């Protein structure tokens, strides 16, 4: 994975250099094969000219047979060199694009988020797909550029042998065409970069809408949200039209210039043949080459455009790959045990929060303000890195700042109330790694047994993306089963039963207490059933712990607590 380098002024260029360096072998092989292809293509009109020049004059069957054999060799070379050259290059292109996709995805999925200048998940997805593909195209661009240059050089040399003026015309015309198109390609690069940014923003807006569609419908905010997306997508459409216009102008200009050069070569050759300065065979060769070089010239003239597009995409990938992490996690791992201590934490609505959960204890936190619960969950899940808040969180006596994030999450699982459900099966959602030793117990404790029994496939019942074919309560119980099946030393649950009925909630509360007996468990909830199952309850009000006792004692002696949790 690329690291941050503040001294590097052009991270996009560095990404392109990395792609080229990693695929130098494939590019050399592809360049040789594609150069052979272009040379053989160029040899075809040259061979036709020689046939007219010599074979038709001699009118010899032997010469005609040699000529036909030569054309067969040329055609075979053209076919095989193109086939294997493109196979090598496209394989390298696809592999390189995959490498960049994995790197961008790894940055987006890092336990400690990177500072990506406000990029949303939808934008990162666009960068990991379209931009990664367009960046990897540089691997094909360079060999095709070189092979096209080979074709132009061979054509220029062959025409120069007939008449130096024809060769000079090709060289000067090619330089002029590329100079004009190089200027135009810069506009394409900047326009493409802007288009990709707007498409990414539209993608991020779609992702937000999909996630929040049901709540939006609930309070009638869907029309305003759709209007917001319409504006973003309209901007992306307009920019796409602008890019298409620029690309169209570029392609039209390139085609027109190439046609002018081909016509100029043909007319000059005809004028020289009319004056007797070149032979009929050389005229045939010149006209054939003039028609042929339009294709490599077209390819040659398009390369600056693709280079600028690749550069623009690489610059966008650099936004993610070169972004520094929010914090540098420590290298240590938690010591054996399961105690959890929050000491004077100030973050969001938390105001010097302090509490301790002893190893093996089942503690519930009753938050009077939902925002305070969300802030606490963010701190415990290391979504808010230690530098983002004051105070300390200690796991098994060690500060979170000294521990690696991966190790923290292996030791302490924080399961949010809105945990994602993935496309697959019930089994793969509960036990993604296939290594859980407590899967049956987790299914039973979460009361997911009725969902399993409802379907013929049982745990292998297919689940759609985001659990679209499950009810809200089923999705919540599936998420809880996954958390319990992980069987971590410390488990933190945030509102795990808000979408289930009261009877099921009672059973789940008892099951969690039974399954987690002897393991450290912290539940942040206002559910009376879970609060009653806990060894003790901490009341979180205005960012601090204001009361501590059993659920029943608090019900008996704290009126505010009764109003907050009684149903």
Image (cartoon, rainbow, N blue to C red):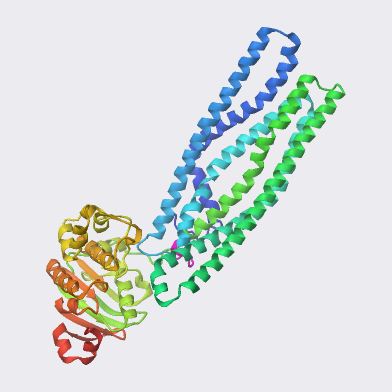
Residue placed farthest to the right in the image? 275
In the figure, 558 relative to 243: above or below?
below
Left or right of residue 41: residue 516? left
Q: Which secondary structure dominates the residues rendered in magenta? A: loop
**Apparent side of residue 372 relative to residue 520 in the rendered image (left or right):** right
Residue 80 percent across, percent down from the top left: 53, 27
| Quadrant of the image containing the C terminus | bottom left
Q: Tell me, yes or no, whether the highlighted magenta stretch contains residue 120.
A: yes
- Magenta residues, start to end: 115-121
Residue 103 seen by the camera: yes
Q: Residue at coordinates 78% horizontally, 32% vertically from top-left?
A: 265
Residue shown at 63% from the left, 53% from the top: 244
- x%, y% of residue 216? 42, 73
Residue 303 vertical placement versus 339 (above, below): above
For the point 49% across and 47% down, which residue is it? 18
In front: 484, or 311? 484
Give the quadrant of residue 235.
bottom right
Residue 1 at least partly seen = no
Rendering coords of residue 532 (x, y %): 15, 79
Relative to 509, does residue 89 appear above or below in the rendering? above
Would residue 49 be counted in the magenta stretch?
no
Tell me what residue is drawn at x 63 percent, y 46 percent.
304
Is 396 placed above or below 194 here?
below
Residue 533 versus residue 542: which sits nearer the camera?
533
């Amino acid at each position: 994975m690329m690291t941050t380098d503040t001294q590097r002024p052009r991270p996009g260029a560095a990404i392109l250099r990395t792609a080229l360096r990693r695929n130098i072998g494939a590019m050399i092989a592809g360049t040789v094969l594609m150069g052979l292809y272009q040379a053989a293509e160029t040899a075809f009109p040259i061979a036709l000219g020689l046939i007219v020049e010599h074979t038709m004059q001699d009118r010899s069957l032997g010469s005609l047979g040699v000529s036909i054999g030569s054309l067969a060799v040329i055609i075979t070379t053209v076919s095989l060199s193109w086939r294997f050259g493109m196979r090598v290059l496209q394989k390298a292109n696809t592999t390189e694009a995959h490498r960049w996709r994995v790197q961008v995805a790894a940055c987006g999925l890092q336990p400690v988020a990177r500072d990506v200048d406000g990029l949303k998940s939808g934008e990162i997805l666009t960068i990991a797909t379209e931009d990664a593909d367009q960046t990897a195209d540089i691997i094909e661009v360079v060999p095709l550029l070189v092979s096209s240059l080979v074709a132009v050089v061979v054509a220029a040399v062959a025409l120069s042998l007939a008449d130096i003026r024809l060769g000079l015309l090709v060289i000067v015309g090619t330089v002029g065409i590329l100079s004009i198109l190089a200027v135009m390609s810069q506009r394409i690069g900047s326009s493409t970069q802007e288009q990709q940014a707007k498409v990414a923003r539209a993608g991020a807006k779609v992702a937000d809408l999909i996630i929040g569609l049901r709540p939006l419908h609930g309070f009638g905010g869907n029309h305003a949200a759709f209007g917001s997306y319409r504006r973003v997508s309209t901007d992306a459409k307009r920019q796409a039209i602008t890019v298409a216009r620029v690309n169209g102008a570029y392609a039209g200009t390139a085609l027109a210039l190439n046609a002018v050069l081909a016509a100029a070569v043909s007319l000059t050759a005809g004028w020289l043949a009319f004056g007797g300065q070149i032979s009929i065979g050389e005229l045939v060769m010149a006209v054939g080459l003039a028609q042929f070089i339009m294709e490599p010239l077209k390819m040659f003239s398009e390369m600056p455009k693709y280079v600028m597009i690749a550069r623009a995409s690489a610059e966008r990938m650099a936004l993610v790959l070169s972004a520094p992490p929010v914090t540098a996690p420590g290298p240590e791992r938690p010591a054996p045990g399961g105690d959890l201590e929050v000491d004077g934490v100030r973050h969001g609505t938390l105001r010097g929060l302090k509490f301790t959960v002893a190893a093996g204890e089942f503690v519930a936190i009753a938050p009077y303000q939902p925002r305070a619960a969300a802030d606490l969950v963010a701190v415990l899940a290391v979504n808010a890195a230690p530098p983002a808040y004051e105070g300390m969180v200690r796991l098994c006596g060690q500060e979170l700042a000294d521990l690696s994030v991966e190790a923290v999450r292996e030791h302490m699982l924080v399961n949010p109330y809105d945990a994602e459900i993935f496309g697959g099966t019930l089994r793969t959602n509960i036990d993604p790694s296939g290594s859980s030793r407590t899967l049956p117990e987790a299914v039973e404790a979460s009361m997911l047994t009725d969902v399993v029994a409802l379907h013929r496939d049982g745990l292998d019942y297919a689940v759609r993306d985001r659990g679209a074919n499950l009810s809200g309560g089923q999705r919540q119980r599936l998420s809880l089963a996954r958390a319990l099946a992980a069987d971590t030393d410390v488990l933190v649950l945030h509102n795990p039963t808000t979408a289930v009925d009261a009877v099921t909630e009672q059973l789940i509360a008892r099951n969690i207490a039974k399954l987690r007996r002897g393991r450290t468990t912290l539940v942040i909830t206002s559910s009376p059933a879970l609060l009653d199952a806990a060894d003790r309850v901490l009341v979180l009000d205005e960012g601090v712990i204001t009361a501590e006792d059993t659920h029943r004692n608090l019900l008996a002696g704290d009126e505010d607590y009764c109003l907050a949790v009684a149903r």
